[in-house]
Image: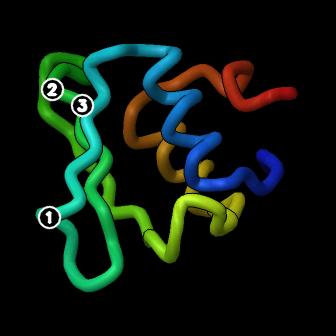
Amino acid sequence: MPKRLKLRELLALLKQHDRRFKIYRERGKGSHLQVFHPDVSGEKKSYPLPNHGMNSDVRPGHISAIIRRFNLPRRIFKS
C-alpha cells in the first residue's frame, strides 16, 4: 500500500510521469476534482479525487485506485 501524499505532491508526480495528465477543478462534484488522462490503453480515463486544499493528505486507498485506473507503475510513488 502506498504511503499518504499531499495533494500537490501527487499531482506533481502524475505530471512528471506523463505530461498528458490534466486536472479539472470545475468538473468535479462538490469538493472533488477530476484527474484525466486521454490515452490509457486506448481509452480516456478519469478519477474523482477529494480536494480539501493542496496541502491535504490523499489517502493510500485513493492512490492505489489511481495506480489501477491509469495502469501506473508503483515505483513512481516510492520515495
Give the secondary structure at mark 1. Answer: loop
Q: Amino acid at mark 2?
A: Pro
- Which secondary structure lies at badge 2? strand
Name which residue type carries label 3. His
Q: Height in image: 25 above or below 5?
A: below
Left or right of 77 on screen, residue 18: left
Q: CB of mark 3 within 8 Å of CB of mark 1? A: no
Task: Identify residue type, mark 1.
Answer: Glu
Q: Earlier in the sequence, mark 3 or mark 1?
A: 1
In terms of image quadrants, where is residue 45? top left
Quadrant where the image shows the C terminus = top right
Residue 58 spot, x, y in % from top left: 63, 62
Residue denoted by label 3:
37
Specify the farthest residue to the right.
79
- Residue drawn at x 60%, y 20% is 73
Where on the picture, by quarter, is residue 12?
top right
Graded by Cα atoms within 10 Å as few (under 14), some (14 to 19) or many (20 or more), the crowding at tag 3 reads some
Checking the image for residue 62, the label placed there is none
Q: CA distance from mark 2 to mark 3?
A: 4 Å
Residue at the image point whose x is 50% and y is 39% from the top: 11
Residue 41 coordinates in the image, percent (x, y): 24, 18
Estimate the x, y position of residue 65 in percent, counting from the top left.
Answer: 51, 52
Q: Nearer the viewer, mark 2 or mark 1?
A: 1
Residues at badges 2 and 1 in contact (C-beta under 8 Å)?
A: no
Label 1 neighbourhood size at 10 Å, few (<14), some (14-19), many (20+)? few
Of residues 32 and 37, the one nearer the viewer is 32
Q: Which residue is mark 2?
A: 38
Q: Upstream in the sequence, badge 2 or badge 1?
A: 1
Q: Is residue 20 above or below residue 50?
A: above
Q: Residue at x 49, y 29 (%)?
A: 14
Residue at the disc numbered 1: 26
- Whether residues under marks 2 and 3 lie with C-beta atoms below 8 angstroms apart, the answer is yes
